[in-house]
Image (tube, grey):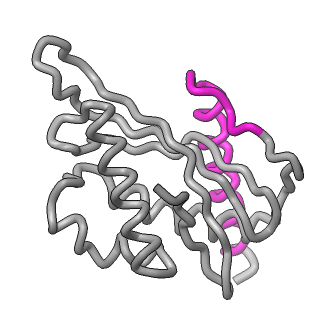
Amino acid sequence: MRGLTGVRLLCAAAILGSIFCSACASSSGHIPKPPSGSVGVAGGYAIEFLQRTETFYTTLIRRRFNTLETFNDRVLRDHFQTPDAFFDYYADLAQSLDEARFERSRPTDVQVEEFLFENRFIAQVQVRFVGKNSRPLNPGRAVLIRLDRWERIDGRWWIRPGKL
């Protein structure tokens, strides 16, 4: 059992390293440090956070955001503490994808570029959404970079959207 824990920590270190390396290569810059600063957290704690965020953001890939199917998705809703928090986040993301000219409001790739722990209970995640551009005379990619706030309440990580 002890060897298995070591393997898990090695895998987690590799995953975290690849995330931080890709964040460094990102052209969008780093998350600005909050006035209170940032903290390092234990490996297991970071892995738990990473797994939760990965589940959420990978669910967003190839999903249309102007459909009831996505709006009613239980996996997405499970990452919000209240229905109102989900409604706020969903409306803001759908509007942002539309303004960024994503074809059919559908990201084809979602990448966590960086995350920063303000303390053990609050983290910020910088996410890059990539998709096809909806403008016919301007083919190519549409890109949206957003900063999401996550909070740990009662032992579970939740997305905390800003108010519209």
Residue at left offset 10%, top offset 18%:
136
Image-based side of 99 in relation to 78, left or right? left
Residues rendered magenta in the picture:
4-32
The location of residue 105, given as percent across then percent down, is 22, 44
The location of residue 11, given as percent across then percent down, is 63, 57
Residue 151 or residue 82, whichever sits in front: 82
Q: Total label count?
A: 0
Question: Residue furthest toward the bottom?
Answer: 154
* Residue 7 painted magenta: yes
**Prevailing secondary structure class for the magenta stretch in the rendered image:** helix
Residue 139 or residue 96, whichever sits in front: 96
Residue at left offset 73%, top offset 70%:
45
Does residue 96 lie above or below 89 as drawn? above
Residue at left offset 46%, top offset 55%:
164
Residue at left offset 22%, top offset 64%:
70
Image-based side of 68 in relation to 18, left or right? left
Residue 108 or residue 9, whichever sits in front: 108
* Residue 96 painted magenta: no
The location of residue 1, given as percent across then percent down, is 69, 83
The location of residue 53, given as percent across then percent down, is 52, 62
Question: Residue furthest toward the front?
Answer: 164
